[in-house]
Image (spheres, coloured by chain):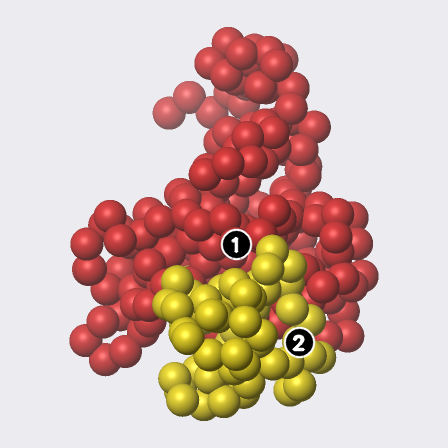
Amino acid sequence: MNTKIPDKNEIDNVLSLRHTQEVFEKLKEARVAVAGLGGLGSNISLMLARSGVGTLHLIDFDEVDLSNLNRQQYFICHLGTYKTEAIKEEISRINPYINVITDCVKVTDENIDSLFKDDNIICEAFDDPDCKAMLVNHILETRKDAYIVAASGMAGVEKSNTIITRKITDRFYLCGDGTNTVVKGNGLMSPRVTICAAHQANTILRIILGKYDI
Amino acid sequence: MICINGEKFEKDEIVLLDYLETNRINPKRIAIEMNGEILPKSQFNEVVFKSGDIVEIVNFVGGG
């Protein structure tokens, strides 16, 4: 196995050649917050890291559990590790020059303002619907400068093409099928969770690049 | 006429809380866009939609 870590210029050159210099620079200058590092957030974080988003602010309070491995981007070696630490390690194996800021906390009414004060692109990737609504409403009500990209409905093996991206307001994008929640016999499965995560990640790249339509 | 989530209602007024109760929607799990603006949560208890209003009620379901 080749363990030589490419230097920063090598990685930057490859990304710049692939994406064009203009796109590369915009992504490198960007900062994105991902709230929740489960099936959505772990996938979104890695997609943004692979794309070369320069600063990722990753938030989750939980540890990697065996029940996560059916859909979340973790491995057996991460069991019992905080998701913030596990995903930071994975990102370093893709591009060690990405600036990863982690907060191993639960988002609450008390800490929400200070947590996101330096973020203006915020990705809602929670599992719990009350938390989803809390974050989205708070950001939309208090942060007129921020974009929020949220998700609702991606459980089961329903048709892939029911997962879509919608633009609710100028600063609020919603991905998912809108209805399929977790019930007995309709659990979260890797493909549809990843499809929804990809919708969110692509929407975020588009916002960074000034493409605000859907 | 009032438009909620694409459905047209031939009414002069609809009380938000009545609509949520009728449709069994949990007010803790929604965000509301009304005529292009986000409706603050603090107004959920008192808002009454009027004729001409175009409303989108985003319902968050679990999973992620």
Query: Closest to the observer: A74 or A106?
Result: A106
Helix, strand or loop for disc 2: helix
| A118 vs A94: above or below | below
Name the residue that disc number 1 marks.
Answer: A168
Vertical placement of residue B35 versus B46, above or below? above
Q: Nearer the viewer, residue B41 or A20?
A: B41
Picture quadrant where residue A13 is located: top right
> In the figure, B32 relative to A151: above or below?
below
Q: Regarding mark 1 in the picture, which secondary structure is present there? A: strand
Q: Which chain is red?
A: A
Can the viewer see residue A52? yes
Q: Is residue B64 left or right of residue A188?
A: right
Q: Mark 2 belongs to which amino acid?
A: Lys
Corner quadrant of residue B62: bottom left
Up/down of A22 relative to A207, above or below: above
Q: Colour of chain B?
A: yellow
Identify the disc placed on residue A51. none
Q: Residue at x 26, y 70 (%)?
A: A187
How crowded is the residue under tag 1: few (<14 C-alpha within 10 Å), some, or many (20+)?
some
In which chain is the residue bearing label 2? B
- Image position, residue A179 (x, y; %): 33, 68
Horizontally, residue A176 falls left or right of residue B1, namely: left
Locate the N terminus of chain A and report the quarter of the image it occupies. top left
Q: Pointer 1 indicates a residue of which chain?
A: A
Q: Position of residue A189 (x, y in %)?
A: 26, 60
Residue position for label 2: B41
